[in-house]
Image: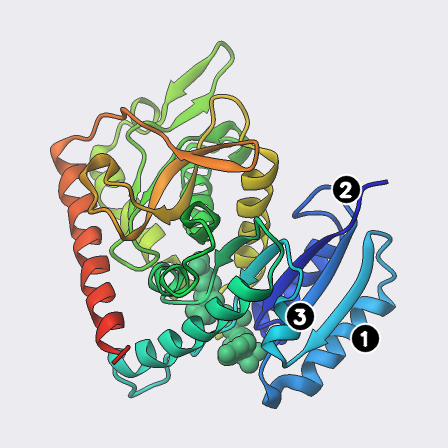
Amino acid sequence: AKDPVSVLVTGAAGQIGYALVPMIARGVMLGPDQPVRLHLLDIPPAAEALNGVKMELIDAAFPLLKGVVATTDVIEACTGVNIAVMVGGFPRKEGMERKDVMSKNVSIYKSQASALEQHAAAGCKVLVVANPANTNALILKEFAPSIPEKNITCLTRLDHNRALGQISERLNVQVSDVKNVIIWGNHSSTQYPDVSHATVKAQHGEKHVRELVADDEWLRGEFITTVQQRGAAIIKARKLSSALSAASSACDHIRDWVLGTPEGTWVSMGVYSDGSYNVPAGLIYSFPVTCRDGEWSIVQGLSIDEFSRKKLDATAEELTEEKALAYSCLS
Ligand code: NAX
């Protein structure tokens, strides 16, 4: 039998946490033969609710679940973890300035970075979900200099999956037959959902989404805005933000990162830019990536037309501004 893998979930008493922890305990994230230990962190006002989540995890008698640590102590939570899913953060409340929200999250991610750096297992892989996800991940990277930058990522897989979903609905095909959409840039409304290279499985080989949809206006207009604004549409409908889809996408992100992407398929991940596609180096930016042996690499050599170029640059610009804002909160 395999040794258990320890997975940290911060913000575990929240909405996404509640959807995510049973998925991890069932093997959705790391596979049906991989035992797990869950480390759940939240803040003191949520301690009782957090303990309730722990009770339910015990009650569910998950065969793969080999232990649960539920705590409000960051060091205890981070100790020995192999995977860290950072869902906890400070939400934007009505009337709050962007800078105030940024400042709260910068201080959270700065201190959690140090705890992870000092106490996580060697090789710990980090996924930041909490918004502003890209910039929180960048702060975490800056304040955990001994964690390799390759090990720090943020979630744009939900946006990626939303794009797959929209194409599948439009063409009335199975979502599992659609692949290679790309989310470029920030997990925000400036993200660029790109179908230039996306395909659908056909009877013989694959067909380009562009050919099948044949309505460029939709692809360059409504499709993009629908994906960009899907989070807001869910809030309007549910009066709560996306949770099950966010949790499921977080599992997809880690599973593909650890176990690899299928041959010929790429996924979107927010990763540390090395300057690929002329995206400024030093931002956490969403790129198309393939994963193998627990490492992601940015897919190289894709053609970028003029329409796409503008959109890649616009979302990079927003991230550069966010980075500056985050740094201005550090003093
Ligand atoms: P909730 O408010 O339900 O849960 C957040 C939890 O984090 C709460 O239990 C809170 O007590 C806890 N928390 C706050 N500060 C903490 C700290 N310093 N350490 C540990 N825990 C802390 O929000 P939920 O709906 O679960 O969303 C969580 C985060 O995910 C939000 O920042 C949200 O904006 C972000 N999202 C990101 C998505 C993505 O694709 N990257 C999509 C979904 C989601 O909107």
Q: Nearer the viewer, residue 234 or 24?
A: 24
Answer few, some or many: residues within 10 Å of disc 3's Cα (few below 14, many 20 plus, some between 14 and 19). Answer: many
> Whole-percent x and y of residue 304?
20, 30
Tell me: is circle 3 under 8 Å from ligand 1. Answer: no
> Can you identify the residue that label 1 sits on?
55
> Whole-percent x and y of residue 150?
43, 45
Q: Secondary structure at mark 2?
A: loop
Q: Secondary structure at mark 1?
A: helix
Answer few, some or many: residues within 10 Å of disc 1's Cα (few below 14, many 20 plus, some between 14 and 19). Answer: few
Decide if residue 237 is in sight here: no
Give the amino acid at mark 3. Leu
Q: Quadrant of residue 319?
A: bottom left
Q: Secondary structure at mark 3?
A: strand
Q: Is residue 291 above or below residue 122?
A: above
> Whole-percent x and y of residue 14?
58, 74
> Can you identify the residue that label 2 sits on?
32
Give the amino acid at mark 2. Pro
Check the image and tell me how it is coloured.
rainbow
Q: Residue at horizontal 34%, vertical 41%?
A: 287
User: Farthest residue in the top direction?
Assistant: 204
Q: Residue at horizontal 28%, vertical 59%?
A: 189
> Can you identify the residue that label 3 sits on?
40
Q: CA distance from mark 3 to mark 1?
A: 12 Å
Q: CA distance from mark 1 to mark 2?
A: 22 Å
Q: Is residue 121 above or below residue 98?
A: above
Q: Quadrant of residue 10?
A: bottom right
* Image depth: mark 2 or mark 3 in front: 3
Q: CA distance from mark 2 to mark 3?
A: 21 Å
Q: Quadrant of residue 208?
A: top left
